[in-house]
Image (cartoon, rainbow, N blue to C red):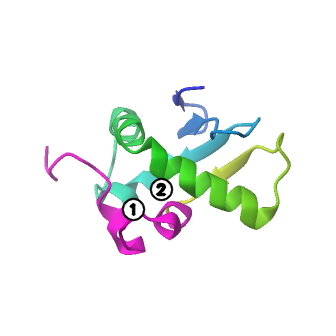
Amino acid sequence: MSARWRPEIDALAFRPSGHGAECVLHRLAFRALTGRPDPTPSDCERLFASRRADFDRAAAAKIARRALPADAAFHLTSRDVARSGPPGGTAHAARHLDPRPHGS
């Protein structure tokens, strides 16, 4: 499943690799990840598409940490994504996942 915007909950939803249920990440979490005060759904989708592996890694870590069953839907927070961090980076580097320069 590719990501889709769910306007009724103001969140991006995706199915993590190897998991049978949906994971959602609220738009406010993307504020922390992008450093933007009001990211649009398109901003969130673009960031997700460019960093899908980072979100899958964060989801896999949360699934393992919580021992979630394969059919359990769950939420990721910006902390979950920061905790997993980009490959070879620090957790703080997750704040700069947005590939676009700030202000664009």
Residue at image position (47%, 56%) is: 29
* Residue hosting label 2: 29
Give the x, y percent position of residue 43.
33, 39
User: Which range is magenta?
Assistant: 79-104
Tell me the quarter of the picture where residue 70 sits: top right
Nearest the eye: 47 or 30: 47
Give the x, y percent position of residue 57.
55, 54
Residue at the outermost front position: 88
Nearest the eye: 61 or 98: 61
Which circle marks residue 58 in the picture?
Answer: none
Identify the amino acid type marked 2: Ala
Q: Is 37 rendered above or below residue 13?
A: below
Please indicate whether residue 21 sits to the left or right of residue 45 in the image.
right
Neighbor class of circle 1 (other Cα within 10 Å; few <14, some 14-19, many 20+) is some
The Cα atoms of the two marked residues, 1 and 2, are separated by 6 Å
Identify the amino acid type marked 1: Ala
Kindly check if marks 1 and 2 are in contact, taking CB atoms under 8 A apart as contact.
Answer: yes
Label 2 element class: helix
* Residue hosting label 1: 32
Tell me the quarter of the picture where residue 23 sits: top right
Q: Is 1 rendered above or below residue 23?
A: above
Nearest the eye: 89 or 95: 89
Give the x, y percent position of residue 98.
28, 50
